Image (cartoon, grey):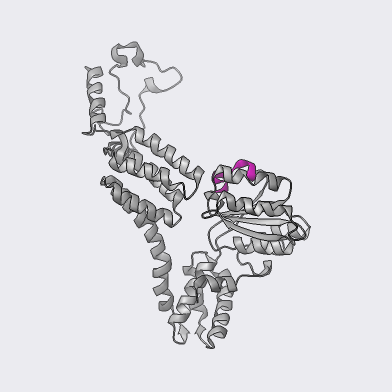
Amino acid sequence: MKHAQLADLLRPESFDGIVGQDHLFGEKGVIRRMLAGGRITNMVFFGPPGTGKTTAASIIARESGMSFRKLNATSASLADVKAVLGETGNVFGANGILLYLDEIQYFNRKQQQSLLEYIEDGRVTLIASTADNPYFFIYNALLSRSSVFEFKAVAPEAILPVLGRALDYLNAETNQKKTVSPEVASYIASLAGGDVRHAIVLFENAYHAADGEILREHAEDFHVGIGALSDDLHYDLLSCLQKSIRGSDPDAAVFYLAKLLSLGELLSVCRRLQVMASEDVGLAYPQAAAVVRACCESARELGMPEAQIPLAHAAILLATSPKSNSADAAVSAAMRDVEAGLGLEIPPYLQSPLFKGYKYPHDYPNHYVDQRYLPLDIPADRHYYTFGPDKTEQAAAEYWKKIKG
């Protein structure tokens, strides 16, 4: 039996079965009240995985009499969207089509814009979901036509009834009478991190590992294999990507990039590449930060699979560029003094409003004048930044010596 099958088999058929989202689907929940009043609107669901977003969308479609269509933005193309939109010329359900678009943050602007005309005139009702902040990743024109609802991580006690249903189903399926104590069930629910789907996966694995009674150790073994290692793998692969780039190995960099993208890690890759542009290449090739930023913006706009091309551009550029961590070292050294409480006595000529005694550098030769800028409670000879040995920084060092001479 596959994990996804059990989660699907236990999927609630009504709002009463959705756990942990009473603010949306309880007796006084806003979405439940909206549907009871005959109102259906475009919606954006955001929140962690396994909190009921897909389930809620399918129930809404059924209760509103709409035809349910589902696409995942990590794999769907513009052609897939147009195929769904093309169905609006026919009669599907009493109230048209409800399109559920999962992981909408992976759709670029053009793909999102293609929906506007259809949701504007009501031919399609859109429910989009994302685990990321929708105000950062969803096109403003879509947001302005939608209501945004937050799904919260599910508390362990709310997951317990789901595990009870899982036990009943598995016992009936296998013709066995395995048991689990309330304490172990609560423990398994707590391991899931608010993700009901993961709780079902974890429970099912523990069930099949147990002879009669499901024990803590059965769940712990699979928690390491499914939960903790998935987080570790996420950070390990990002670390491998950065170490390969720092070590000037473009082949390893491209491999780890491909591995991360195959796991859907587009946004985390973009963030890490932008960090590396300044942390590991930095002042040895200052333009790298701008190029990498442009590649990452292009990747987010394109979406997968095309996003892999500008990201490969960025990763190879960084791996083959000269390296310097002088900017990172400088700010880290300055931060140590800040955290030690230094820097409270600012020179009076640097303070507004009069700046009395301040020497304006542009009035002096080479646009430079000897003047103290560091706070008075930090030694005047304190140096945070040291010029690196690379060509670019050494050229800056020569210029610095020249103007001071």
Q: Horizontal and vertical percent for residue 76?
A: 55, 54
Which residue is pictured at 38% across the width and 53% down the height? 258
The span shown in magenta is 133-142
From the viewer's perspective, is residue 140 above or below residue 198?
above
Judging depth in this view, the residue of 317 and 199 nearest the camera is: 317
The quadrant in which the C terminus is found is top left
Judging depth in this view, the residue of 157 and 400 nearest the camera is: 400
Which residue is pictured at 39% across the width and 69% down the height? 225
Judged by its main secondary structure, the magenta piece is helix
Tell me where residue 368 sits by quadrant: top left
Horizontal relation, residue 377 to residue 25: left or right: left
Which residue is pictured at 45% across the width and 46% down the height? 307
Q: Horizontal and vertical percent for residue 123?
A: 72, 51
Q: Horizontal and vertical percent for residue 163?
A: 55, 75
Instruction: Answer whether residue 340 is visible to the viewer in this image.
Output: no
Tell me where residue 339 sits by quadrant: top left
Residue 165, magenta (yes or no): no
